[in-house]
Image (spheres, rainbow, N blue to C red):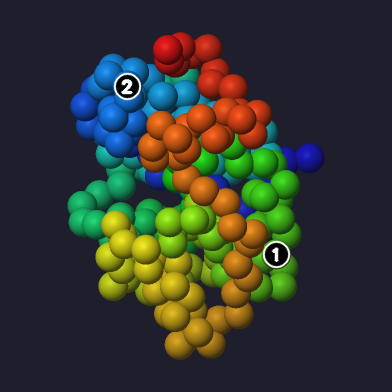
Amino acid sequence: MLDRNTLVIIMCKAPVEGKVKTRLMAKYTAAEAMAWHQAMATTVIERAKGLFQDVWLAVDDVQHSFFTPFKLPLYAQGEGDLGERMAHILEQAAQGGFEKTLFLGTDSPHMLDKRLLQARAALDDYDVVLGAVEDGGYDLIAMNHAYPSLFSGIAWSSEHVLQKSVDTAQKQGLNYLILEESFDVDTPDMLYRAQQLGWQAPKIANPS
């Protein structure tokens, strides 16, 4: 049964050659890296659609044709750093009547359904749920109410992203859960690792 009480927001870049998954270009061409981005995003989006009733795509280009086949609400991320853009979308979610929200990126196509379901279930007992990843960030963040301050003052390219959000939660008296550590797919080695765990790229992207 689809979860009807939680809004999933997927932060996703439009596939533009040379602008996405650039760290994969140590091995792949810009076109191939773009295709891998499409494959990863497609997997993440379709997984969320299969588990949750309400899924939004927060994108950098609402006009890009890549997003059309998913038939999901599109929201412009707006300006600013990642945290400011997430806070902007969170405000729109609150205005739409959603309390529980779960943010995802598109860098974890290997994520299992149970990780998402665990995060959602934990919101019954915790204010905030974070999915730790090896580089010091997180692959998901779920909240039982809007807490935009969790996204502020963060150096998003650093290894302190998760800890900064945890520090903010502690200062605000929010109880939180950190899920078992996983990893994001940024490099060719991580891509291979995701495939070894069973992820198969959808044919829509047809990367080589």
Element under disc 1? helix
> Which quadrant of the figure contains the N terminus?
top right
Q: Residue furthest right?
A: 1
- Residue 206 in the image: state x and y as whole percent: 46, 12
Residue 15 relative to residue 110: left or right:
left
Quadrant housing residue 165: bottom left
Residue at left offset 43%, top offset 80%: 168
What residue sits right under mark 1 in the picture?
A: 122
Please report the residue visible at 28 percent of the width from the left and 28 percent of the height from the top: 25
Q: Identify whether 100 is placed above or below 42.
A: below
Q: Secondary structure at mark 2?
A: loop
Residue 124 visible? The answer is yes
The quadrant of the rendering that contains the C terminus is top left
Specify few, some or many for label 1: CA neighbours under 10 Å numbering under 14, 14-19, or 20 or more.
Answer: some
The residue located at (54%, 35%) in the rendering is 193
Tell me residue 18's x, y (percent): 21, 27
* Residue 127 visible in the shown view: no
Image quadrant where residue 27 sits: top left
Q: Amino acid at mark 1?
A: Ala
Residue picked out by circle 2: 28
**First reached walking from the N terminus: tag 2 or tag 1:** 2
Tag 2: residue type? Answer: Tyr
Foreground residue among 118 and 201: 201
Rendered residue at 37%/63% (across/down): 159
Give the vertical position of 29 relative to 50 (above or below): above
The label nearer to you, 2 versus 1, is 2
Q: Is residue 56 left or right of residue 160?
A: right
Picture layout, residue 160 above or below residue 182: below
Q: Position of residue 104 (x, y in %)?
A: 49, 48
Closest to the observer: 23 or 90? 23
